[in-house]
Image (spheres, helix red, strand yellow):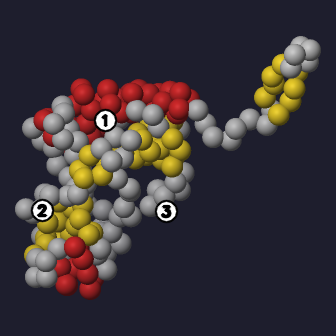
Amino acid sequence: MAGARNGKNKVIRGTTNPRRSVMNISHQIALAVERTRKLIPGYFEKTLSQRAELSGCAAGSIYESIDEKQLEQMLLGAKWEEYSHEAVMSGCQAFKALMPGRLGIVDLRSLPIGTVVSLDDRKNTGKVSAIVQGVRGPKVDFTVIILGPEQGEEVIYTFHPGDPVRPSQVQATPGLHGRQVAIEEALGMGLEMAKIE
């Protein structure tokens, strides 16, 4: 309940707006950045480098024509709002802000028939993803940041232009990692998206 005063100096009771203020969310994200730096040294900086086009090591989903410092300032200065999406893992919180970028993934069905993709499990997740080269992802006008628990504290899991995508569920059986297949075969395996390299 929130209180306000009427003209007779009496408190009037009412319900608060269930939507959180932009300031509270921005503060929550700033604290999560600090905790990420403390609990997972180098992770946040590596993520900034992978996303900032001018870093020299940008890959996948990127923010064009900016460096790491500019990207961090944009993230901390953005007007975030609560956001939900089916691909956000249970126990995590997601927020969305108007912050344009370029996707680092592409729908396999949007590629020309016969396009070859590589199957990849370089992170040893036990699942393979499709990787495609020589394609530019589409531009989007918003960014999603996902926060989640680490050692009992809330940290930044990831941030990227556009909606989150569910990870592949295709098992990395022996011989799949590194194999090249046409998109038709990749679709038949159950893959839907390809990461852009």
Quadrant housing the N terminus: top right
User: Given the image, on which type of amino acid does mark 2 rest?
Assistant: Val
Looking at the image, can residue 171 be seen?
no
Numbered circle sitting on residue 86: 3
Q: Residues within 10 Å of mark 1 (few under 14, many from 20)?
A: many
Q: Looking at the image, do the residues carrying marks 3 and 2 touch, with CB atoms under 8 Å apart?
A: no
Where does residue 167 sit, x and y in percent of width and height?
35, 64
Quadrant housing the C terminus: bottom left
Q: Nearer the viewer, mark 2 or mark 1?
A: 2
Q: How many marks?
A: 3
Where does residue 95 sit, x and y in percent of width and height?
47, 44
Image point 18% across, 31% down: which residue? 67
Q: Which residue in the structure is indicated by mark 1?
A: 44
Q: Which residue in the structure is indicated by mark 2?
A: 135
Q: Is residue 196 left or right of residue 3?
A: left
Query: Does 81 appear above or below 27?
Result: below
- Element carrying mark 3: loop
Image point 13% across, 72% down: which residue? 117
User: Given the image, on which type of amino acid does mark 1 rest?
Assistant: Phe
The image quadrant that residue 172 belongs to is: bottom left
